[in-house]
Image (tube, rainbow, N blue to C red):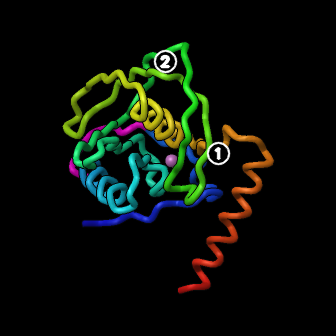
């Protein structure tokens, strides 16, 4: 099992735009395995490659209660979003211990490649819809706190910078 280091907001690397995966090969499959291990260990319901400083369009998601239904999305694309929106309280492994509400389309349809490079499409609502949009934002270099007010963002940045210093101090 290989655990990857998750970047923490406001790390500038979280704002890099990920490149499409050219070919789903053994290298990509290894990245997916390591990302899944990292997500389950955290624990989290989703992880984008950007968060582990790999700037390729790869997501792993598991919204099941039992945490044994891994979903892999390579080169995900939003093909449809519902006009209806829904407020959801979101969190992020890159923004530890902070949760806030974001308004997003309630239902989305996403097309992607699976772990074998085969194309598939999924229509999602509820937590999976939120998670897909949140993780796809990461691939565009966007963190969910960027939907919040400047004041909140500044507070979060200061708090996390302080937290990072304290963690270094503890080592
Ligand atoms: Ni996140």
- Asked where in the image residue 96 lies, by quadrant, the reply is bottom right
- Where does the magenta region start and end? 20-27
Query: Is 156 positioned to the left or the right of 50 in the image?
Result: right
Helix, strand or loop under label 2: strand
Query: Is 118 positioned to the left or the right of 154 in the image?
Result: left
Upstream in the sequence, badge 1 or badge 2? 2
* Magenta stretch: dominant secondary structure: loop
Task: Tell me the quarter of the image containing the N terminus.
Answer: bottom left
Residue 14 lies in the magenta-colored region: no
* CA–CA distance in space, label 1 to label 2: 21 Å
Report the front residue among 151 and 56: 151
Residue 87: where, in percent of width, then height? 58, 30
- Asked where in the image residue 65 lies, by quadrant, the reply is top left
* Vertical placement of residue 11 versus 32, above or below: below
Callout 2: CB less than 8 Å from ligand 1: no
Residue 22 lies in the magenta-colored region: yes
Query: Is 115 positioned to the left or the right of 7 in the image?
Result: left
> Which mark is on residue 81?
2
Please identify the residue farthest to the top as the structure is shown.
83
Query: Residue visible at 38% across and 42% down?
Result: 59
> Which mark is on residue 145?
1
Residue 133: where, in percent of width, then height? 49, 33
Residue 36: where, in percent of width, then height? 30, 53
* Vertical placement of residue 103 versus 141, above or below: above
Query: Residue visible at 70% across and 64% down?
Result: 159
> Which mark is on residue 118?
none
Query: Residue visible at 52% across and 60% down?
Result: 7
Query: Is 167 positioned to the left or the right of 70 in the image?
Result: right
């Amino acid at each position: 099992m290989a655990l990857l280091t998750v970047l923490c907001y406001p790390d500038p690397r979280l704002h890099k735009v990920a490149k499409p995966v050219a070919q789903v090969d053994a290298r990509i499959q290894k990245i997916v395995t390591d990302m899944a291990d990292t997500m389950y260990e955290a624990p989290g319901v989703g992880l984008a490659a950007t968060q582990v400083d790999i700037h390729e369009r790869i997501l792993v998601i598991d919204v099941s209660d039992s945490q044994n239904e891994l979903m892999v999305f390579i080169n995900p694309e939003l093909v449809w979003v519902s006009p209806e929106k829904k407020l959801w309280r979101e969190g992020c492994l890159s923004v530890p211990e902070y949760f806030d509400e974001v308004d997003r389309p309630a239902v989305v349809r996403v097309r992607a490649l699976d772990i074998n490079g085969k194309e598939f499409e999924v229509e999602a609502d509820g937590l999976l819809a939120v998670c897909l949009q949140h993780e796809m934002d990461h691939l565009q270099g966007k963190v969910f706190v960027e939907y919040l007010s400047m004041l909140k963002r500044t507070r979060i940045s200061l708090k996390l910078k302080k937290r990072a210093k304290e963690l270094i101090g503890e080592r």
